[in-house]
Image (tube, coloured by chain):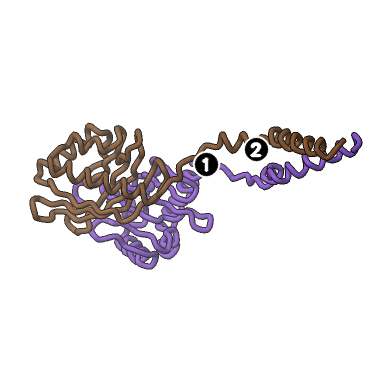
Chain colours: A purple, B brown
């Protein structure tokens, strides 16, 4: 065997070794996963809350209910949890019919990951300009088809008489 | 060059190729990260709730308060959120002094990751054998020094009059 031939063996062996080790392949297939950003998620949730306030102001219970997941739970005071979008729409219609068409939702803090966020917030409800409710809430938001939806929504009053 | 010599070249080249590729090294250094298991976390939270029930039964407000994080919020009805372990201890002392020493906490579902879990649950409170409260809650649990602690705790009544 001459020098040329032995060099050929070395080159081929190197190529086979690299193919077997799979290192080249791994590097190529590496998918760059987008980094989750909590502050962006917080802004998205603040926007969803703004939509909630706007739909309440226009007495649009259907759009309000669509901010919830289909299997959401609206955990209101004075009754067991209201389950599902249709029942939540009825509950929100009741709220609107009672004269409440203005809400002030204020996000205090959020925690979570790309598909589930827990939000702590403060809520005030108004009949025209009169504040009729002041409370606090936790909402578990779920990302469905790229949009944040209320999945679990619980609140209670800061005032002694509800 | 004889067959033996060419075989030696192949072996050495393979070894060099594997050393250069660094694959062997990577495999050794690979740290096995423990997989987060939600059902295990759920059991841990059910255990923490059992501890809550036991400390309430023994009227141990200090141990009850220690189930919360130092910066926890106890979001009770009828007042703004009670912030911090010391204030939460006072609130829980009040509960005990009112005669409530039996609670039934029942986990419905949990969501989250290794350091933050949101729990949905059902709660009943008793004065001796009489049920005086029936409600629902969301708790945001935070893992602190390897233990699940209540970080945000909000609940409300299923009954019309609280």
* Residue B97 relative to residue B150: left or right: left
For the point 22% across and 36% down, the residue is B65
Residue B75 visible within the image: yes
Number of the front mark, 1 or 2: 2
Indicate the position of residue A5 as horizontal and vertical percent values. Answer: 89, 39
* Residue A112 relative to residue B8: left or right: left
Q: Nearer the viewer, residue B45 or B73?
A: B45
How would you rate the neighbour count of disc 1 (Cα within 10 Å): few for under 14, some for 14-19, many for 20 or more?
Answer: few
In terms of image quadrants, where is residue B131?
A: bottom left
Q: Are marks 1 and 2 in contact (CB under 8 Å)?
A: no
**Residue for badge 2:** B23
Q: Is residue B158 above or below residue A110?
A: below
Mark number, residue A37: 1
* Residue A96 relative to residue A38: left or right: left
Indicate the position of residue B107 as horizontal and vertical percent values. Answer: 29, 53
Q: Nearer the viewer, residue A112 or B28?
A: B28
Badge 2: chain ID: B
In terms of image quadrants, where is residue B147?
A: top left
Badge 1: chain ID: A
In terms of image quadrants, where is residue B97?
A: top left
For the point 49% across and 57% down, the residue is A144
Q: Nearer the viewer, residue B42 or B95?
A: B42
For the point 52% across and 58% down, the residue is A145
Mark number, residue B111: none
* Residue B126 relative to residue B20: left or right: left
Indicate the position of residue B69 as horizontal and vertical percent values. Answer: 30, 35
Indicate the position of residue B86 as horizontal and vertical percent values. Answer: 22, 32
């Amino acid at each position: 065997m001459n020098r040329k031939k032995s060099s050929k063996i070395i080159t081929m062996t190197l190529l086979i070794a690299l193919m077997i080790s799979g290192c080249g392949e791994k590097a190529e297939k590496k998918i760059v996963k987008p980094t989750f950003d909590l502050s962006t998620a917080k802004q998205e949730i603040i926007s969803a809350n703004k939509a909630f306030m706007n739909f309440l102001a226009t007495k649009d219970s259907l759009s309000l209910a669509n901010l919830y997941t289909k299997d959401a739970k609206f955990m209101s005071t004075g009754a067991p949890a209201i389950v599902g979008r249709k029942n939540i729409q009825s509950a929100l219609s009741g709220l609107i019919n009672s004269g409440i068409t203005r809400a002030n939702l204020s996000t205090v803090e959020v925690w979570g990951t790309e598909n589930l966020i827990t939000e702590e917030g403060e809520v005030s409800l108004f009949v025209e300009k009169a504040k009729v409710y002041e409370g606090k809430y936790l909402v578990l938001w779920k990302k469905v088809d790229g949009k944040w939806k209320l999945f679990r929504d619980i609140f209670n009053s800061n005032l002694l008489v509800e």
